[in-house]
Image: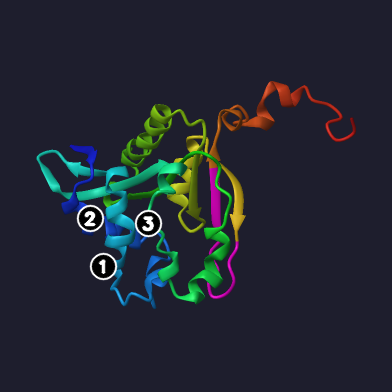
Amino acid sequence: MYKIIPAKPEHAKQIVSYVGITCYWKEFVEGNDLGQSFEEFMLQWYVNPRLEDTKVLVKEGDEARIYGCVIAATLDRLGEMPDYTPHLHPRVMEVFGNWFQYPVSDSVVLELFALDPALRGQGYGGRLYQVVEELAASTGKECIAAFVWSCFPDSLVTLTRRCLMVRGCINFPSPVDIPLLYLEKRPEYTATKDYFQSKPYQATTNMLLS
């Protein structure tokens, strides 16, 4: 049996490993002006500042090893995090600048959503995602936002099944050829689930001509 618990400092290095396989973080850190290794940079600038916003999946009776994790916080909370971008190589900002400047709605932002491959398809991804729903409810946020790389169909399936809808797509210059999707969940989006099969749509006439 597995359970979800708040992340602890001893989990930080394992979280770095999960972060590193979900994005171009290796490329972000290469050439940083602090001369830090990947692990050093990620611990100082990303993982440790977000520990209290992180939940991890562990086995009952053994909380040392993690099997998945989720990082989520309100947009305001993320605005309090240390800004690592001044330390990145200028080429990183040149390639990924559109992402860093993308307008994210006032929301709970799902920053990391990762699960051990051996546990996929068993409902644990849904349990991790529920952490985000609970945070949105407790903070009074009607919107949940997430960026998901298009090469992660399992994550997209999990999120779209829970009514997050793709609202934007960021394309990057060479050599990055994988688009990044921006998803949101709002009450009005949930209401349009299976829209073309709904009675309101079926009863609509002259939508474009009126």
Location of mark 3 (residue): 82
Question: Are the residues at dot 3 and dot 2 in contact (C-beta closer than 8 Å)?
Answer: no
Q: Residue at x 38, y 28 (%)?
A: 138
* Label 3 environment density (alpha carbons within 10 Å; few <14, some 14–19, many ≥20): few
The quadrant where residue 87 appears: bottom left
The kind of residue tagged 2 is Ala
Q: Position of residue 187 (x, y in %)?
A: 56, 28
Instruction: Please report whichever mark, 2 or 1, sits nearer to the chain's N-terminal start.
Output: 2
* Label 1 environment density (alpha carbons within 10 Å; few <14, some 14–19, many ≥20): some
Q: Say whether residue 180 is magenta.
A: yes
Front residue of 17 and 72 = 72
Q: Position of residue 79 (x, y in %)?
A: 44, 49
Residue 16 left/right relative to 169 = left
Q: How is the image coloured?
A: rainbow
The kind of residue tagged 3 is Pro
Residue 4 left/right relative to 133 = left
Front residue of 118 and 95 = 95
Instruction: Please report whichever mark, 3 or 1, sits nearer to the chain's N-terminal start.
Output: 1
35 lies above or below 117: below
Read off the magenta span. Answer: 171-183
Location of mark 1 (residue): 40
The quadrant where residue 82 appears: bottom left
Front residue of 132 and 177 = 132
Q: Viewer-nearest of labels 2 and 1? A: 1
Residue 13 left/right relative to 132 = left
Q: Position of residue 11 (x, y in %)?
A: 20, 52
* Quarter of the figure that contains the N terminus: top left
Disc number for residue 12: 2
Q: Viewer-nearest of labels 3 and 2? A: 3
The kind of residue tagged 1 is Glu
